[in-house]
C-alpha cells in the first residue's frame, strides 16, 4: 500500500514537474514573443486640435478626446484619489495581483467574466495595448506586458501614462479632459472633492456618471465615500479635512456635441482639406496633430454675429446663407459661415451648396470688355425688354423691374446693373472671353460655364467660396491665389508635417483691374448696394446679384485688404426668395449687403483705410462720375442721406 502511495506521489511529482516545465516554457516563449508596443504611440494618441490663426482652439477631431499632461502637472491629491480608488499599494506592489488573478480565474471557470483584482499596471496594459476580449490568452498577454512595463519603466512613468490613458466616459480619455468635461476646469485646478469624484468614476463611467442614467448618482456618492475613506485611512487626508468633506457639484453632459452650431462647418471644411492634403482619418483621429488654420477668431465671430443680427426674422427653415471672407493675394480664408447648425444640416452652404450667381457674374463680362478696349465711358442703350440671338434662338432680356435706362455710359450701367446693356456687352467682348475671365479669376472647372448670352447674367451655379475667390482676385489687382484653410500641421512631437505655400499668379493686367474696381466702387457708392454699404464708412467695391425668379441673392465686395461674398438661397432652385423679410423681392442690395457691411465694419474697425488705385481709363476717355445715387429698394431701416456732391471712391494708393 505504501509502495502504491509512493508511486502515485512520484508520479504526481513528475506530472507536476512536467506541467511546471511546460507552463514555464510556454510562459517563457510568450514572454519573449509578446512585445510591448511603443507606450507613447497609444498614450500620445489624441484628438487632432484645430486652431484659429492666433493659436486659440476651434475644436477637435478624433474619437479619443485626450490632452496629455505630465505627472508633475497632476496634483498629488488627484494621484492619491486614483490610488485610493484603484490600487492604494501601487508603489509597493508588483506588476500583477496573484489573488486577483486567482479570483478572476475562478470566476471565469464558473462561467462569469474575467475581471477583478487588476493593479494599475495591469489596467494600463489592458487599456493601452490589448483588445477588450476577456479570455485566458489575453489575460496572459496582459500579465506579460505588465511585467515588462515594470521592468522597463518607473512607477511614476506607468502612473503618468495610466492617468493620461484611462477612460472617464463622455468621450474623455485622461484626467485633463475628464476634469474639463465633469468640472469645467483643468486637472491641476481640481479640488480634493472633485479629484475623488473623478477617481470614483473611472472604474466604470457607465455605472457612475451621474448624468448618464438613473441610479448612477447614488452609486457615485457611495463610491466617492469609499475613495475618501481610503484616502483618510492611508493618511492622505487629515482628520480635520476629512470631517469637512462634501460631495461636489458635477457638470451635466454636453449633449450638443463639438460639431454643433456654425463651428461644425469650420471643422468639416478643415477636415476635408486635411484629407485632400494626404492626412487620412486614422491620423486625424489618434495622431495628436495640431492644425493651425487661416481663420481669424475675431473675424469668424463677426461673421456669425452679422448673420445673426442682420438676417431676416421669421425666415423659412429652408433659407440658407453662405459666406466666405478671403485675404486678397494670399487666398487665406479668414472667416466662413456655412450654416446655423451642422448637426441639423451636414451641407456647408459656403463650400458645398451651389446657387445661381445672378449679376455677380457681370464683372467677368466687364473684364472681357476692358481687355477688348471697350471704355467705361462708352454709351449703351438700356431700354427694356430686348431680344438677343442665342445660337439662332430668341433670348429675351429685361431689367430689374423692367426699367428702361435709355442711353447711358457703361460706368452707370455697371452701377445700376443694367441687364439689357450687359448681355450685348458680353456678346461684343466675346462670350468665350467672358468664360475665360471667370476661370482666371477663380471660378473652378467644377462649375459649368457655357459661352452663351445668359452667362453674363449668372445662370451658372458656383459655390460661395468660388465667387469670394474671384472677388479677392479683383481686390489683389489681378493676382489670383487659391483659397485655403490649413496653414500648418504639427505632429504630436511638435514637428512640422505640412506648411502651406502661397503661390500667387497674376492673371489680369493691373489697368483692367483698376477700371473694374472703379466701376464696382460706383456700385457701392451710388448704385444698387448704396443703401446698405454706405454705412461702411470707407471706400469699397462690389456687385449685387439677384438671379432669375429671385431664386438667389448675392452681395460680393471688397476693400484692398479683404474680399467677402454672401449668398441667400433655398433648398430648391425653383423656390423664390420673394416675401422673405417683408420684401417683395429679396435682392443682393438688401439683406446680403447689410450682412456684408456689418461684418466688414466689425473686422475693419481697427484697420487703417486703404484706397484703390486710380482708374486707368482704358479707351482714353474719362467717364463722368455718377452724381446721384441710383434709386434702390427702400432700405430696411432709415439710412443717412447721400452726400450732396459725392466723389468717386477710387483714390491713390496712399492717403492724401
Image: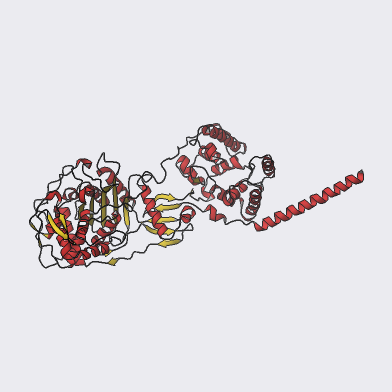
Residue most toward the front?
392
- Image coords of residue 361 (percent x, y): 22, 57
How many numbered discs, if any?
0
Decide which of 57, 7 is in the foreground and name it. 7
Quadrant that contains the N terminus: top right
Residue 614 in sight here = no
- Judged left or right of residue 425, residue 331 is right
- Image coords of residue 257 (percent x, y): 42, 43
Residue most toward the left?
406
Residue 272 in sight here = yes
- Image coords of residue 141 (percent x, y): 64, 51
Decide which of 62, 386 is in the foreground and name it. 386
Q: Is residue 120 above or below residue 463?
A: above
Decide which of 242, 574 is in the foreground and name it. 574
Decide which of 602, 169 is in the foreground and name it. 169
Quadrant that contains the C terminus: bottom left
Task: Say which residue appears at 32% left-offset and 61% top-offset.
Answer: 482
- Image coords of residue 146 (percent x, y): 63, 51
Amino acid at each position: 500500500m505504501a509502495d502504491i502511495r509512493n508511486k502515485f506521489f512520484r508520479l504526481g511529482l513528475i506530472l507536476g514537474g512536467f506541467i511546471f516545465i511546460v507552463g514555464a516554457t510556454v510562459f517563457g516563449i510568450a514572454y519573449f514573443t509578446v512585445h510591448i508596443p511603443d507606450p507613447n504611440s497609444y498614450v500620445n494618441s489624441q484628438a487632432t486640435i484645430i486652431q484659429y490663426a492666433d493659436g486659440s482652439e476651434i475644436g477637435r477631431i478624433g474619437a479619443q478626446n485626450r490632452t496629455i499632461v505630465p505627472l508633475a502637472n497632476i496634483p498629488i491629491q488627484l494621484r492619491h484619489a486614483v490610488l485610493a480608488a484603484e490600487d492604494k499599494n501601487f508603489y509597493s506592489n508588483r506588476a500583477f495581483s496573484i489573488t486577483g488573478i486567482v479570483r478572476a480565474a475562478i470566476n471565469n471557470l464558473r462561467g462569469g467574466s474575467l475581471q477583478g483584482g487588476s493593479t494599475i499596471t495591469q489596467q494600463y496594459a489592458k487599456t493601452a495595448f490589448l483588445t477588450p476580449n476577456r479570455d485566458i490568452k489575453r489575460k496572459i498577454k496582459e500579465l506579460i506586458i505588465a511585467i515588462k512595463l515594470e521592468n522597463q519603466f518607473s512607477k511614476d512613468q506607468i502612473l503618468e501614462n495610466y492617468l493620461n490613458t484611462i477612460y472617464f466616459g463622455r468621450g474623455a480619455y485622461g484626467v485633463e479632459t475628464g476634469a474639463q468635461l465633469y468640472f469645467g476646469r483643468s486637472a491641476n485646478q481640481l479640488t480634493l472633492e472633485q479629484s475623488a469624484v473623478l477617481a470614483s468614476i473611472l472604474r466604470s463611467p457607465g455605472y457612475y456618471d451621474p448624468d448618464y442614467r438613473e441610479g448612477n448618482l447614488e452609486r457615485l456618492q457611495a463610491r466617492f465615500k469609499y475613495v475618501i475613506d481610503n484616502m483618510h485611512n492611508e493618511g492622505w487626508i487629515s482628520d480635520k479635512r476629512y470631517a469637512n468633506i462634501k460631495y461636489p457639484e458635477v457638470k451635466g453632459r454636453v449633449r450638443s456635441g463639438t460639431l454643433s452650431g456654425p463651428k461644425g462647418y469650420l471643422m468639416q471644411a478643415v477636415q476635408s482639406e486635411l484629407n485632400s492634403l494626404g492626412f487620412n482619418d486614422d491620423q486625424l483621429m489618434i495622431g495628436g496633430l495640431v492644425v493651425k488654420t487661416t481663420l481669424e477668431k475675431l473675424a469668424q465671430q463677426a461673421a456669425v454675429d452679422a448673420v445673426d443680427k442682420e438676417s431676416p426674422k421669421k425666415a423659412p427653415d429652408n433659407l440658407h446663407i453662405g459666406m466666405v471672407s478671403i485675404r486678397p493675394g494670399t487666398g487665406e480664408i479668414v472667416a466662413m459661415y456655412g450654416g446655423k447648425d451642422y448637426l441639423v444640416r451636414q451641407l456647408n452652404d459656403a463650400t458645398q451648396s451651389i446657387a445661381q450667381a445672378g449679376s455677380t457674374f457681370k464683372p467677368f463680362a466687364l473684364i472681357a470688355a476692358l481687355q477688348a478696349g471697350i471704355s467705361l465711358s462708352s454709351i449703351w442703350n438700356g431700354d427694356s425688354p430686348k431680344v438677343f440671338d442665342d445660337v439662332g434662338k430668341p433670348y429675351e432680356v429685361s431689367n430689374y423691374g423692367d426699367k428702361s435706362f435709355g442711353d447711358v455710359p457703361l460706368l452707370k450701367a455697371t452701377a445700376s446693373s443694367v441687364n439689357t446693356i450687359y448681355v450685348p456687352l458680353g456678346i461684343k467682348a466675346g462670350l468665350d472671353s467672358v468664360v475665360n475671365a471667370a476661370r482666371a479669376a477663380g471660378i473652378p472647372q467644377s462649375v459649368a460655364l457655357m459661352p452663351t448670352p445668359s452667362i453674363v447674367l449668372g445662370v451658372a451655379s458656383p459655390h460661395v467660396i468660388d465667387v469670394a475667390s474671384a472677388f479677392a482676385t479683383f481686390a489683389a489687382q489681378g493676382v489670383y491665389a487659391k483659397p485655403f484653410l490649413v496653414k500648418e500641421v504639427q505632429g504630436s512631437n511638435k514637428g512640422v508635417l505640412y506648411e502651406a505655400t502661397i503661390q500667387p499668379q497674376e492673371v489680369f493686367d493691373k489697368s483692367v483691374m483698376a477700371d473694374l474696381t472703379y466701376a464696382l466702387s460706383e456700385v457701392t457708392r451710388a448704385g444698387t448696394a448704396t443703401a446698405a454699404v454706405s454705412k461702411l464708412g470707407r471706400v469699397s467695391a462690389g456687385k449685387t446679384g439677384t438671379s432669375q425668379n429671385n431664386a438667389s441673392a448675392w452681395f460680393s465686395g471688397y476693400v484692398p485688404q479683404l474680399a467677402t461674398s454672401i449668398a441667400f438661397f433655398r433648398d430648391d432652385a425653383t423656390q423664390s426668395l420673394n416675401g422673405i423679410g417683408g420684401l417683395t423681392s429679396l435682392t443682393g442690395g438688401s439683406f446680403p449687403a447689410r450682412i456684408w457691411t456689418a461684418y466688414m465694419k466689425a473686422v475693419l474697425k481697427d484697420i487703417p483705410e486703404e484706397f484703390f488705385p486710380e482708374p486707368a481709363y482704358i479707351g482714353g476717355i474719362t467717364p463722368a462720375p455718377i452724381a446721384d445715387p441710383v434709386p434702390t429698394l427702400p432700405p430696411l431701416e432709415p439710412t443717412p442721406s447721400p452726400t450732396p456732391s459725392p466723389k468717386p471712391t477710387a483714390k491713390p494708393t496712399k492717403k492724401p
